[in-house]
């Protein structure tokens, strides 16, 4: 045992070197491991950002195709709405194999010119005669009425905007079906007015206004907006309500052209009655 102590005492510097060397190697290995982990984490973060940027660019480049697909999907959904059909009595009429007859059909179009600051505003659409568009067809958007087609060329059409002094739309209060007329007075492009509301009708702020379906142009229950205020103007006996328009016509890019498949039949019948009066 004494010899062992003497051996250790004689070579204690060597043993200290081995101990310190081992500790240094362990610390170095540990440091390199942390360094390696940090590098791997940083590399993953950088590559993740690159992949994200590439995905964002790819998504942006495909927006046009995505928008076109959405428009096609929305058009199909609009064409399947119940309001587009009239119900006939199969005991009297036999039409194919259904009691439903289509009344309205839709096609999507891009708005390529538009105005909201004039007294009489119009929109230009990129669909025309070649696409089946004709005057007196309605134009709507996902959340409101846009206008009525007035002039058509081979590939384009011009629609009178709902923001036009001559534009009148038959509308109703959704909660009670009371009818009125919507027109624009040329001031705020986000507001219009509903007239001829009987004074006995109970109104409330936020009441929803929709199309009445009495027109040959627009289907029933197309959103117009909500009631903001109302009054009986001097010299009148009916309410005039201020309507917050649901559709911001200053931001519209796409629209849907509405075709009433029974428009000519209805017009001809109504004209034959009025001509006899």
Image: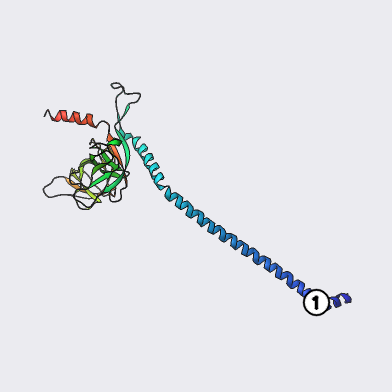
The N terminus, quarter of image: bottom right
The C terminus, quarter of image: top left
Residue 94 sits in which quadrant?
top left
Q: Is residue 132 left or right of residue 194?
A: right
Residue found at x 38% / y 45% = 67
Residue 69 sits in which quadrant?
top left
Residue 154 picture location, percent across and down:
27, 38
Residue 261 picture location, percent across and down:
27, 31
Residue found at x 51% / y 54% = 51
Compare residues 28 and 243 and report the one nearer the observer: 28
Question: According to the image, what is the colour scheme of the structure?
Answer: rainbow
Residue furthest to the front? 154
Which residue is under mark 1?
Answer: 12
Badge 1 marks a residue whose secondary structure is helix
Residue 158 sits in which quadrant?
top left
Q: Is residue 173 visible?
A: no
Residue found at x 80% / y 77% = 12
Q: Is residue 30 visible?
A: yes
Compare residues 181 and 144 and report the one nearer the observer: 144
Residue 268 picture location, percent across and down:
19, 29
Compare residues 242 and 123 and report the one nearer the observer: 123
Residue 92 picture location, percent across and down:
28, 21
Q: Callout 1: few (<14), some (14-19), or many (20+) C-alpha neighbours within 10 Å?
A: few
Question: Total of numbered circles in the picture?
Answer: 1
């Amino acid at each position: 045992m004494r010899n062992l102590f003497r051996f250790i005492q004689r070579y204690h510097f060597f043993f200290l070197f081995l101990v310190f060397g081992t500790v240094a190697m362990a610390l170095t290995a540990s440091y390199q491991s942390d360094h390696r982990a940090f590098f791997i984490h940083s590399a993953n973060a950088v590559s993740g950002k690159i992949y994200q940027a590439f995905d964002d660019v790819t998504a942006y480049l495909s927006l046009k195709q995505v928008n076109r697909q959405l428009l096609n999907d929305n058009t199909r959904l609009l064409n399947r709405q119940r309001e587009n059909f009239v119900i006939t009595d199969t005991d009297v009429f036999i039409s194919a194999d259904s009691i439903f007859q289509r009344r309205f059909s839709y096609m999507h179009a891009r708005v390529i010119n538009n105005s909201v600051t004039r007294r009489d505003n119009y929109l230009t659409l990129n669909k025309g005669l070649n696409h089946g568009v004709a005057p007196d067809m309605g134009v709507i958007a996902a959340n409101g009425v846009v206008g009525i087609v007035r002039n058509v060329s081979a590939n384009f059409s011009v629609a009178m905007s709902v923001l036009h002094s001559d534009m009148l739309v038959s509308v109703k209060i959704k909660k009670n079906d009371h009818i009125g007329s919507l027109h624009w007075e040329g001031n705020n492009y986000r507001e219009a007015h509903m007239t001829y509301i009987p004074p006995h009708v109970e109104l409330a702020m936020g009441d929803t206004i929709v199309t009445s379906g009495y027109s040959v142009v627009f289907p029933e229950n197309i959103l117009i907006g909500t009631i903001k205020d109302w009054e009986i103007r001097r010299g009148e006996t009916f309410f005039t309500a201020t309507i917050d328009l649901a559709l911001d016509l200053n931001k519209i890019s796409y629209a849907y052209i509405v075709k009433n498949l029974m428009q000519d039949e209805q017009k001809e019948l109504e004209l034959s009655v009025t001509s006899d009066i």
